[in-house]
Image (tube, rainbow, N blue to C red):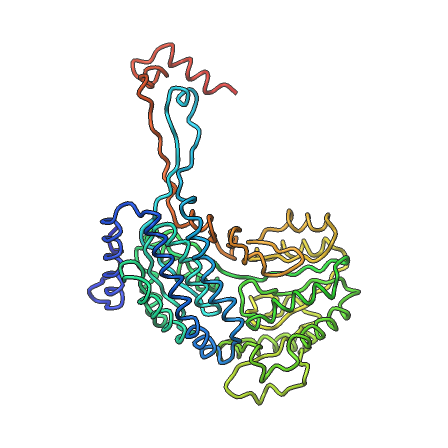
Amino acid sequence: MNAPQDINVDQDPITDAMMKVLEAQRSDYIAQGHVSAEVRIDRMRRGMNSVAKFQDKLVDALSADFTCRPRQLSMLTDVAASVLPFKSGIKHVKKWMKPEKRKSMFPLGLLGAKSWIEYQPLGVVGVISPWNFPANLTFAPMADILAAGNRVMIKPSEFTPAVSDVMAEIVADAWDEKEVSIFTGGPEVGAAFTSLPFDHMIFTGATSIAKHVMAAAAKNLVPVTLELGGKSPVIISRGADIQQAIGRIMMGKTMNAGQICLAPDYLMVPEENVDEIVAEIQSAVGSMYPKLLDNPEYTSVVNDRHFNRLQENLADAQAKGGDVIPCNPSNEDFDTQQGTYKIPPTLIKNATDDMRVLQEEIFGPLLPIKTYKNFDETIDYVNANPRPLAVYYFGKDQKEERQVLERTTSGGVTVNDVIMHIMQEDLPFGGVGPAGMGSYHGYDGFKTFSHAKSIFKQTSIANVAKLGGMLPPYNDTTEKTIKMQTKI
């Protein structure tokens, strides 16, 4: 594949450097030919071992970039969540690579013809990863990409530069540049990266940025996998165990200070239970975080830009009649914090649709609450808005559960918990509509980053074209074949 026509690589040193690496990776991939299971396993194992080797540096870098991020959270969500996909790929790739038998049309199969699919690497895959879980959302898709036999080029987020530096060390330690390469830097690096003629590209991040990524990829007809976000609703049924539900919801909402694409974005609760639910949320937050400001287990908002955005959203909600309720167990003064950008978990009761918190993905520890009278109102509301990345239902009513599963469309669903479906390596993770396209994880990720090549091997027993009347001059056999194939 040639460089895109509208890019003059001789005049763009950033693009020129990236193009040289891309061309080197593609040339080496072609020269290698078949990528054996042993080669794929070796590449994944090197990556897994290097992540483990640099885990302490990753944790320190995450804490530095966020100004406060608990070690345990970083170990669980960035280190362990990077290692596990590699382990899964190493264990299963030989099985995934096996050809799939398919049926041949009658009567060719009876005569010895065969049909099957072989999964072939795409070539060079570009990975654009975000800042909220920067290691995990780089290495997890990479495990699937390497399992599929591809080469990789990475562009990490400029919002977590310390982590990007450690990831660059990991890449240099684990792989040759012709296998995996990484390019750090700001928007100009990102723009150049998205302009490259990859064989596939995966972007994880905001929907607004995804539009630019997809437009740039379209110039080279590069297929894309988009892992985005949106407003993931939580529906609490009248039959739910409220204490259990709120404990699980607030675990997910306060994890990483709500800076998760799958974080619960708003609650829909029975109108008669709203005050009970608010009280239960306050209790749940107090149990997890007796203090917040100097608590190393409560994550800071990543930077001043996002801190200010969230504060503006709170001011907007309050100005439009929302009841803003901070969950601040020790009544700490957040205006006096030094060096961090912490915001307490904050509820917005009486939230209305004209508020920013119900129009934009929150990506922070703010939680609007809407009420309903009839359960159908919850389904109607979800369907009246853009399709979310996830829907969460809490309750014991099987009829309601089926309504949520069958009448709403989302990337995924967790029932009686939040976020947990992404932790299942054997379930595909991905969005739908504005929440994304395509998916990865396990076998589904292997297929996403592979080309399913259809193969048909004709029988040598007979002249099939003549037997079926396909060989001119056409005759009665031809007419019989047509009549048989068009019979309804």
- Locate residue 324 relative to residue 110 in the image: left or right: right
| Looking at the image, residue 49 lies above or below residue 479 | below
| Looking at the image, residue 163 lies above or below residue 455 | below
The residue closer to the viewer here, 12 or 250, is 250
Q: Residue furthest left?
A: 10
Residue 316: x and y, percent? 61, 76
Residue 160: x and y, percent? 42, 74
- Locate residue 278 relative to residue 362 in the image: left or right: right
Q: Residue visible at 62% across and 51% down?
A: 408
Residue 8: x and y, percent? 22, 62
- Tally of numbered tags: 0
Q: Residue visible at 31% across and 48% down?
A: 35
Quarter occupied by residue 458 = top left
Q: Residue furthest right?
A: 272
Quarter occupied by residue 181 = bottom left
Quarter occupied by residue 174 = bottom left
Q: Residue visible at 58% across and 75% down?
A: 313
Residue 70: x and y, percent? 53, 76
The residue closer to the viewer here, 366 or 154, is 154
Q: Residue furthest top?
A: 476
